[in-house]
Image: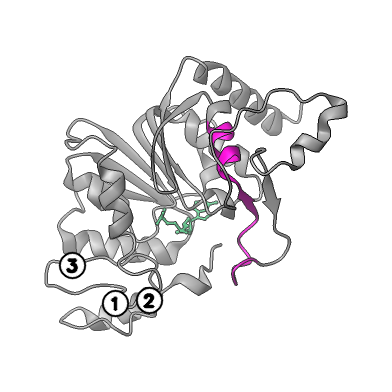
């Protein structure tokens, strides 16, 4: 379970009629702006998070989401789910941490969005074998919390019919690097800056023991491609990728893995 110790607000800066509720539900990772003017994390260490992130990301997504189904994996207090619902989408928002779902459900009521967003207490791995498809899948801020991150990404991709929105905490580095097979004797190339890489974190990173893997940008792009999705746009560190024909093969590979894990064969 995520602790996110370093990037949360204790809600102490909250004012207004809902300030007591906000403090009782703290700590907050999302600074939600409520209709009465209250904010859940006005003292957030990242600023008005994730509002500033959404402003840029929204320009890469449909401006009208009526008729679209959105899945928000690792929804936290629901910021992105609420924004998609405001644009008309029918949203399923899942998180494995009941404390964040309590924040999200409370906020949905105060934002008047409870009828457009349904919350599920669910782990990303529980998407294994799910046959539902969503037009847009948000998989942001979760990957690096997973001990088996590529499985998590495969599963997110397997329920995505069109647009996968992927973001991970990562290591800096160049993107768009052509790799190819360097051959057995060319292994030195794997040490080059742009080669797709992930750093394994044993123990704790940034004060959070739930951080496991930090990929560099070329690794993120390559993993998204290997799930059968084509990165088409980027908003800061967020990748917006579209499903390609190759996703069918990736889906079969994921289904075979899930079946193998279940049956022990
Ligand atoms: C860093 S926050 C990101 C929240 C939000 N998606 C965003 O980008 O602002 C990570 C969220 O993912 C959730 N999470 C972590 N591991 C998960 C897992 N295995 N299954 C479902 N949710 C998970 C945490 O509880 C937390 O709410």
Tell me which label, 3 or 2, sits earlier in the chain. 2
Which one is in front, 262 or 96?
A: 96
The reply to whether dot 1 and dot 2 touch (C-beta < 8 Å) is: yes
Neighbor class of circle 3 (other Cα within 10 Å; few <14, some 14-19, many 20+) is some
Compared with residue 169, is residue 128 higher up or lower down, i.e. above or below? above
Circle 1 is placed at which residue position? 22
Question: In the rendered view, how is the structure colored?
Answer: one colour
The secondary element bearing badge 3 is classed as: loop
Image position of 7 (left or right of 48): right
Quarter holding the N terminus?
Answer: bottom right
Residue drawn at x 42%, y 67% as measured from the top left: 99
Tell me which label, 1 or 3, sits earlier in the chain. 1
Residue 178 visible to the viewer:
yes
Image position of 181 (left or right of 209): right
Any magenta on residue 147? no
Indicate yes or no: mark 2 CB to ligand 1 under 8 Å.
no
Q: Which residues are magenta?
A: 205-224
Q: Give the number of marks.
A: 3
Compared with residue 88, is residue 236 higher up or lower down, i.e. above or below? below
Neighbor class of circle 2 (other Cα within 10 Å; few <14, some 14-19, many 20+) is some
Q: Residue furthest right?
A: 185
Q: Which is more foreground, mark 1 or mark 3? A: 3
Circle 3 is placed at which residue position? 34
The reply to whether dot 3 and dot 2 touch (C-beta < 8 Å) is: no
Circle 2 is placed at which residue position? 26
Image position of 98 (left or right of 151): left
C-alpha separation, residue under disc 1 versus residue under disc 2 = 6 Å
C-alpha separation, residue under disc 1 versus residue under disc 3 = 11 Å
């Amino acid at each position: 379970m995520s602790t996110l110790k370093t990037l949360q607000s204790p809600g102490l800066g909250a004012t207004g009629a809902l300030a007591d509720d906000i403090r009782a539900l703290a700590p907050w990772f999302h600074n939600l702006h409520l209709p009465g003017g209250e904010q859940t994390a006005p003292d957030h260490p990242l600023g008005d998070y994730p509002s500033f992130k959404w402003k840029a990301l929204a320009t890469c997504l449909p401006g009208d989401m009526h008729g679209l189904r959105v899945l928000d994996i690792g929804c936290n207090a629901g910021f992105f789910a609420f924004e998609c619902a405001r644009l008309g989408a029918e949203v399923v928002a899942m998180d494995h941490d009941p404390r964040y779902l309590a924040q999200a459900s409370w906020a949905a009521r105060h934002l008047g969005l409870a009828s457009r967003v349904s919350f599920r207490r669910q782990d990303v791995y529980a998407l294994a074998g799910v046959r539902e498809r969503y037009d847009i899948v948000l998989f942001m801020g979760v990957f690096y919390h997973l001990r088996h991150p590529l499985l998590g990404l495969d599963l997110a991709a397997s329920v995505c019919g069109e647009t996968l929105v992927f973001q991970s905490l990562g290591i800096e580095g160049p993107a768009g690097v052509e790799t190819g097979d360097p051959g057995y004797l060319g292994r030195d190339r794997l040490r080059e800056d742009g080669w797709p890489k992930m750093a394994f974190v044993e123990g704790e990173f940034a004060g959070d023991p739930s951080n496991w893997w930090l990929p560099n940008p070329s690794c993120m792009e390559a993993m998204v491609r290997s799930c059968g999705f084509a990165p088409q746009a980027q908003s800061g560190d967020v990748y917006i990728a579209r499903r390609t024909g190759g996703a069918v093969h990736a889906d079969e590979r994921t289904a075979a893995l899930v079946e193998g894990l279940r049956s022990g064969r």
